[in-house]
Amino acid sequence: MTETSTADDPTIGIELTPEHPIEELLESGQRAEQAGYDIIYASCHYNNRDPFAFLARLAAATETAAIGPGVANPHDTHPAALAAKVATIDEASDGRAVFGIGPGDPSTLRNLGASEDRGLRPVLETFKTAQRLWAGDRVDQDSTFTANDAGLNFEPPQGAEIPVHVGGEGPHMCRMSAKHADGLLYNGSHPADLSWARDRVEEGLSDRPDERGDFELLAYASVSIADTVETARDAARPPVAYITAGAAPPVLDRHDIDRERATTIGDNISAGEFSAAFEAVSPEMVDAFCMAGTPEIVSDRIAATLEYADGLVAGSPLGPDLQDAVELAAKAADDAI
């Protein structure tokens, strides 16, 4: 039987995407901290601005919110280099870093020739290696990546205790994160998906050693919020296209979404035919993969999701007006709680 969330004070985070200019993102990050978000993630895609450059600036522009990549992958950056980047953000933010790590977006990794390398094992080996490096160990590795006596020349403020949040949606990734990590960033916006994810998390938690401490299931939800339903749903098309293209066949089937159409969207994204990809997004895809609508609609959807999740991350696009959406999404989450 599914166990629902019992969190009295759910974690509320936000994803900022470096497709926007850095100065605009910094303003959004400061607004997010003032609005009460607990965590600010920077999304990671090779074709956007560098997320760690943004996070370094964000560390200086904020004081209380945790910050980190959401989510990095071990295919476009070597895992040891990722560990150093996250440790640097931890130092720059006086110990507020969180390491979001996942298998990577298949549509963009296809451009780098790395889409076939995605999977659970590289993710697990990456954050386990990072934890050893943060603790001051030197690492030899010859598996999904190679390291020969690799080590860091500094130790982050949190040491090896930097929280690790795994981004993913497959059953094995859900169970692995519950057993080994500090949280799961489940790429889902629909209560049916979070109910399913909760069951997989509970299976993983049954094998979790007590010394690993608490664990959070966070709905990493695409949110598009505006004063009118139409403008919110229209703004949702780009991220929904990416989510649909990367969704596993069982997820598509759960929402009666045509697999061939989803594949075509992914092919268009990889080819840079973004208009064609976004135009192919159906209303059913928006319903399944985004919380899109007025503040009241989004608040109701958040409340339904928190029946199964321990918190929520409001992800891209947030809305047609980024700055307004930061505050509207925070208010919707407060109303839902």
Image (cartoon, grey):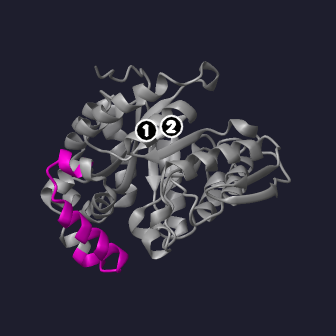
Residue placed farthest to the right in the image?
Answer: 153
Q: Please report the residue visible at 54 percent of the width from the left and 66 percent of the height from the top.
A: 23
Residue 68 in the image: state x and y as whole percent.
58, 50
- Rendered image: mark on residue 174: 1
The amino acid type, in three-letter code, at marker 1 is Cys
Residue 60 in the image: state x and y as whole percent.
67, 54
In reply to whether residue 252 is colored magenta, the answer given is yes
Residue 31 versus residue 53 in the image, above or below:
above
Region rendered in magenta = 251-276
44 with respect to 125 (left or right): left
136 with respect to 334 (left or right): right
In reply to whether residue 93 is colored magenta, the answer given is no
- Rendered image: mark on residue 163: none
> Secondary structure beneath disc 1?
helix
The answer to whether residue 200 is visible is: yes
Which of the 4 image quarters holds residue 257?
bottom left
| Distance CA(mark 1)–CA(mark 2) | 5 Å
Dominant secondary-structure state across the stretch colored magenta: helix
Residue 164 in the image: state x and y as whole percent.
59, 41
Q: Please report the residue visible at 21 percent of the width from the left and 40 percent of the height from the top.
A: 296
Tag 1 and tag 2, C-beta contact below 8 Å: yes
Viewport quadrant of the N terminus: top left
Local packing at callout 1 (Cα closer than 10 Å; few below 14, some 14-19, many 20+) is many
Q: Say which residue label 2 marks.
A: 177
